Amino acid sequence: MPSYKAPLEDVNFLLNDVFQIDRYNNLPGFSDASADVREAILSEAAKFAEEVLQPLNRVGDLEGCVRHDDGSVTTPKGFKEAFRQFAAGGWLGLSAPAEYGGQGLPVTLTQTIAEFQTAANMAFGMYPGLTQGAIAALLVHGTEEQKKTFIPRMVAGEWTGTMNLTEPHCGTDLGLLRTRAVKQPDGSYKITGTKIFISAGEHDLADNIVHLVLARIEGAPAGTKGISLFVVPKRLINADGSLGGSNGVSCGSIEHKMGIHGNSTCVMNYDGATGWLVGAENKGMQAMFVMMNEARLGVGVQGLAMSEVAYQNAAIYARERLQGRALSGPQAPDKPADPIIVHPDIRRILLSIRAFNEAARAMVVWTSLKSDIAHRSADEKERQAAEDQLGLMTPVLKGVLTDTGFANTVLAQQVFGGHGYIAEQGMEQFVRDARIAMIYEGANGIQALDLVGRKLPRDGGRAVMAFFGEVGAYAKEHGGDEAMAPFIAPLSTALGHLQQATMWLMQNAMAKPDNAGAAATDYMKLFGLVTFGYMWARMAKVAQDKIAAGDGSAYLKTKLVTGRFFVERLLPETALHLARIQSGCATTMELPAEAF
């Protein structure tokens, strides 16, 4: 059976040394997250993930969720009790404002802890993750009454949240949605329609479920310009705040799916359900994007988390499994064979995964800090810069972390050989669970198009130019440091490739949009590699400085070797992506549809 240990040492290195989180103590909530507080929170989160959530992962996969004849849904054995512990521990409201019962601590901590929860039990982690996203949307766009009614109970875990976008006939193209909203004399709306693929749409973990639903008000414009967002609770709420009767919301069925069996993915039917407008009429996409952007960062973390837990188990197996002899001669002459960790190809797999995990974790912390700055800083210029960076990095983080995270679960499975294909080892579940992260919250091809089509040209390219400036300045600052040469030279080359690709798109995408479409995924992956290279350079510099100051820990030495592997073996792939981008769309678009 698989195991999991939260990467506390790596997280603390990033928070304390690389990004020096205490520098942000001028922001609300940061001074409350002192080093001692952070250590206590992270340790408890790790303990909960390892001891409570991880043992339920296999249970959830085997049992799944069960829908009953009355439309109610039962979650797997142990999930309800674990959720109660989770809520009682205050984890749902870690970063929520204190006025609504939260602790007001940095979102950076919440995202870090989300990795632990997801790696231990991805299906379980989706229940609180969606709730936190719904809280974020209501905080920004809800009325004061809506905030007071829903958020404290969601923070307490008494109620949970969902997002309802997709319909049977439309996925990403939400302009086609048919769910309708009819205004009532009291200002509420009657919501009617069907939504599919609704994660945590119905379950037994909480007394009420707060659905955020996209619908079209009667007479609204066609397309996305006529979409509004509504809050539709599963059960109505009495004037005194107590729960009333059911609200015309029901689970029609549970999807039978490849993975994440412990999460109830539902078809939701709205039959004249009462809902209340969130934000302005016909501005539902703006309101929902608050939740979607939160969710996309969370899904990126899922890619990292599944890669991490798969790596940990593959590394353990590689040290224990005896098979063949080392090419350089027996390494364990007292045993019938050497452990497979001696083989270069096994090490290639493990180092490839590990090098990604550590860079991706750094990117998550870096991006989460931008989110905190964007929402908490009193400096308008600082907020704007953080918002620019957050918008630019969201599709990269979501797309690259989930694409590579899934690929890494397959690589880790390969280490086990035939045993990895057997359910008993748990590796095939990691593969199945990780696969969805590439699809939901906007399939990764859409993320790539969003990056190339919307994020790059926004505000005259202000965000991407700022990124180029930051990375370029870092490379220049440390270019004369001989010890940093193995990191700075490859980073500078990779940055040059990204700049060339960006210029090529500027010159070739406007006149022929298919050039942008054909290049989008390669551009996203190229951007991700450069970001990882930048993260590795920053980590390497800190590690070198700590070693020079007398810290001879194995952790730091291992960090530097892993970083060198990344810049030598993985970062050069930027040249491949550049070549693909510059080839244009000709062969991609040449064949007629019937030739496929």
Image (spheres, helix red, strand yellow):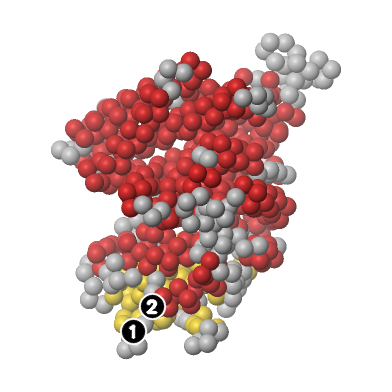
- Is residue 16 rendered to the left or right of residue 363? right
Q: Nearer the viewer, residue 61 or 86?
A: 86
Q: What amino acid type should be assigned to the residue bearing mark 1?
A: Gly
State whether residue 490 is above or below residue 184: above
Residue 37 image point, x, y percent: 64, 52
Residue drawn at x 57%, y 78% is 70
Image location (x, y in percent) of residue 588: 27, 34
Q: Which residue is mark 2?
A: 276
Point 67% across, 51% down: residue: 40
Q: Residues within 10 Å of mark 2 (few under 14, many from 20)?
A: many
Q: Is residue 78 left or right of residue 141?
A: right
Q: Which residue is mark 1?
A: 187
Q: Nearer the viewer, residue 381 or 14?
A: 381
Residue occupying image coordinates x 47% and y 51%? 26
**Distance between the Cα atoms at labels 1 and 2?**
8 Å
- Relative placement, left or right, of 422 versus 148 is right
> Is the N terminus in the top left, top right, bottom left or bottom right quadrant?
top right
User: Does residue 63 lie above or below 556 as drawn?
Assistant: below
Classify residue 511 by image quadrant. Answer: top left
Which numbered disc covers residue 1?
A: none
User: Which amino acid type is marked by label 2?
Assistant: Trp
In the rendered image, which quarter contains the C terminus?
Answer: top left
